[in-house]
Image (cartoon, rainbow, N blue to C red):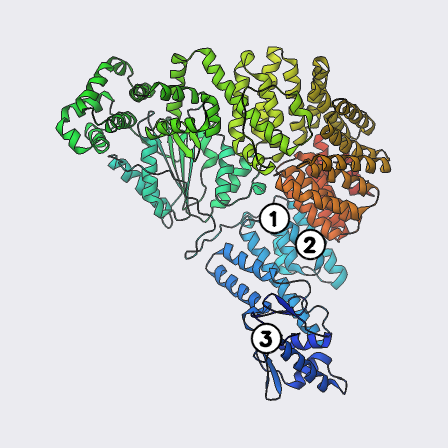
Amino acid sequence: MASGKDQGGALRFAVLGPVRAWRGAEPISAGSPQQKALLGALLLRGGRTATAQELLDAVWGEDPPPTALAALRSYAFRLRKALGAEALATVDGGYVLHAGDGFDLFLAERHQAAAEKARAAGDLATAREELRGALALFDGEPLAGLPGPYAETQRTRLLEWRLQLTEACLDLDLQAGCHAEAVSELTVLSAEHPLRERPRALLMLALYRSGRQAEALGVYADTRRLLDDELGVDPGAELAELHQRVLEADPSLLPPPVPQAEAVAEPVRPAQLPATVADFTGRVAFVRELGERLAASSAEGGVMSVSAVAGIGGVGKTTLAVHVAHAVAGTFPDGQLYVDLQGTAARPAEPETVLASFLRSLGVTDSAIPESLADRAALFRSTLAGRRILALLDNAHDAAQVRHLLPGTPGCAALITSRARMVDLAGAHLVDLDVMSPEEALLLFTRIVGEERVAAERQAALDVVAACGFLPLAIRIAASRLATRRTWTVSFLARKLSDERRRLDELKAGDLAVKATFELGYGQLTAQQARAFRLLALADGPDISLEAAAAVLDLDVYDAEELLETLVDISLIESAAPARYRYHDLVRLYARDCAERHEGDDARCAAVSRLLDFYLASAMCAYELENPGDRVLDHLSPVGRRGLAFASREEGLDWLYTEAPSLLAAVQQAAADGCEGPMRRAADLLFTAQDLMESGIYARQYEQATRAVVATADACGEPLVEGRARVLLGHLLGVTGQFTEADQEAERALLLGLATKDPLSCTYAPILRGMFAAYGQRFDAAAAHYRQGLDAYRGDRNRHGEAAALSNLSRVQNELGEVEEAVLAAEQALAIYRELGAGFRLGNGYYALAIALTAADRNEEAYACLTEALPIFRDARQQLWEGMTLFRMAEVQLASGGHRQAASLAEQSLNLLRETGGAWRRAHALTVLGKSLAGIGQPDRARACWRDALSEFTALGSPDAETVRRLLGGPAAPAVAV
């Protein structure tokens, strides 16, 4: 080996694991265990000189061999040769090692110091990040394998330090509101250090904040019994006090407001306000009134302020609100949220959806967003606690829509716009916005058209703004038309308005005045622009992509983009994002009215049909990439146009999730069109987009669309469409744990499929019925259903479906004691998925094989299969299957005696399944968690889990309740396939 001085790169050292050294990226041999012990001792001196005697004691203890000093010098010589004389020097008969900046212990200490500084400044996010950085430097046991008493002493010290860092980090997790995520790690930590009270206290607090009070009390009971048995003492004062506060449901145990660092930027600071208009005009009194109220709410000691601006459409509510919000943005340094609540649309934005969007903008992950409206609202308020954030809730339908969207703590404020006066919104400051004064209206017109043109024809300009009813939106559209037509005079525009005065006079207030103003802009469009303006408004989605718009207009993408951008330029549509477009709600209503007047029924239906064809063709492409070999596509309706072609399954999946709101809105629109609508293609589109139902994100909207198709098909006597839609509804209800209703839907779907000889219903429905029979522990019936589905898939030559049937059949064979047959069926399924190059269904194959291998006591192989499945489900955004895979991994660890790891995995599973999968699956996760806790000496907490599981199973009428009763009162029963 070359000497240290001949090698390039800086030296690096590690003691927070095996003692190691590197120069650059190249490892340096540290020699024998005694030589490594010498290196470790020198490193731990921290750059201070160690005498020969001190080093002899460190390496050999109090009774070194006679040759120890010679050996020490030999080791030092070898280390100097390897590291270089600049690193290891002889000083006064001793040795000193200059580790430099690449020493892991020094780096970890710096992380800890930075964490303490950040915590003192109130920056919890940075403090947590620094502590995680320190802990990441540990690589197993410190000084691993080193001999000698000194190494043993230092090893103990470093292990204690790591434990303290871990406790501090978890404490910060709880302060930051990450209590649910911390439970898993705290469960393992308390099992590894059963006599240490601090992890137990943190675990109790995390469980309590996660709504698991009984488990928190169980942790205390377990701790008290353990301390009494092992040490003959009671829990300390801190733990006893916490126990009493949990018993009393002390409100102060709830997550505290998160203190915000003044000097350090927050990780997530939403800045969602739309751009303010450069020519904002007038409204001086309103700007001052609203600005002062909002600023006061952000001041020290201020209360949460809610202001609601009401007025007719087009009066400038949004423009005023956005302008005021920008003016006071500096007093809300933690961010500004914005949402268009689509209050005048046929389906206003749902508060649950808005809260999910807000929470993501504030840094909350999808997996941490609760399912119910109340839970999302509570998490939203908790996330805003201690922060100064402004929420602009634009275009609200009514007070009920916004109540759950309001911040709940001082320092925050909400500014609402709506056509309705929100007299029933408690505590709201109400502002009624009227039309502009003549002077303000003329000033706005002048700023858009230009001073020179207006000054020459002042009276004509006054006539124009008067004809517009002094409505800001009307004035802006009229002035924009004039500004872009240099050959027009103001008088010419006034005469044009005079020609239409009869209609304007008849439209006395509100939307009618806006409609008249839109008429001014619409009348100046070319025939092609007018057609695009009319047809594009027929789509029900919140916005529309360029490619989908091209389908509606029956144009190629390039021509469609050029046309749409001209409409953006004249403010008739908005560009929501690159290559995405949307209407202001009033403009959409006007455009649809134009479509009814100027487009025949056939033309309107054809436009909507082309959109549905585009979505179906694109979804089919994405489905084929994700599910190669699945013959579902062969049984779908033919489409009249091509969709998008995706280069990879990831690209197709991205498209599906991006388009989900608009795609599902198109399905509901098709169902709403009744018996004349394209119902079959709507049902087929749901089939190709079924990945959305198991993701947990769009499950509710998917259910609404599916139920709409079922109802319409039933009313119109379309049994094939009804059967397909009921298959999907049954599947969805099964995902959410509503097994009785799900089985009823699957049964009806099968009858309809048999009556219409529909291959999709006849293959899917038996598999669903088998699943629900298995969930009810009717295993013989389940096997019969699965075999019926398997025969149907084979008869259809659908290899993909055959694999799915074999996977499910395997799980029931386990329950029937046919263990070898179960493994064989699962192996066949996995082989088919591999052969086809399946996407996330390959994960289903590994999952099914893991269950069979577990039943065959081949736990190591089973765990390997689950380890393969987990990243597949995560990449496919399948939260349900990710949670179930973690649950299965916990079962395997439990069967193998790995109780601590099983508890951690069960906690992770439960955290995901609380948001999707239904009560039945959560109860199974609680059951396994309880078994794991019992195995690590926490029987009281285990019983709390089992009591919660029993409550869930009993409410569902599930036979699994008996299994849990036996756990609570006697020996455990075997788990049931999930």
Task: Quadrant for the C terminus, please.
Answer: top right
Q: Position of residue 297 (x, y in %)?
A: 37, 44
How many C-alpha atoms fall within 10 Å of the one at disc 2: few (<14), some, or many (≥20)?
many
Q: Which residue is mark 1?
A: 181
The one of 579 and 710 positioned closer to us in this rendering: 579
- Assign a secondary structure to mark 3: helix
Q: Which residue is mark 3?
A: 6
For marks 2 and 3, give the one nearer the viewer: 3
The answer to whether 310 appears left or right of 137 in the picture is left
Q: Going from the N terminus, do you reach mark 1 or mark 3 first?
A: 3
Vertical arrangement, residue 702 with respect to residue 758, above or below: below
> Which quadrant of the structure image shows residue 374?
top right
Q: Going from the N terminus, do you reach mark 2 or mark 1 first?
A: 1
The one of 424 and 658 positioned closer to us in this rendering: 658
Q: Are marks 2 and 1 in contact (CB under 8 Å)?
A: no
Q: Position of residue 952 (x, y in %)?
A: 69, 35
How many C-alpha atoms fall within 10 Å of the one at disc 1: few (<14), some, or many (≥20)?
some
The answer to whether 69 appears left or right of 637 in the picture is right
Q: Residue at x 71, y 46 (%)?
A: 867
> Which quadrant of the structure image shows residue 21?
bottom right
Q: Which residue is mark 2?
A: 188
Kind of residue indicated by mark 2: Val
Vertical arrangement, residue 359 with respect to residue 55, above or below: above
Q: Going from the N terminus, do you reach mark 2 or mark 3 first?
A: 3
Q: Residue at x 72, y 28 (%)?
A: 801
Kind of residue indicated by mark 3: Asp
- Assign a secondary structure to mark 1: helix
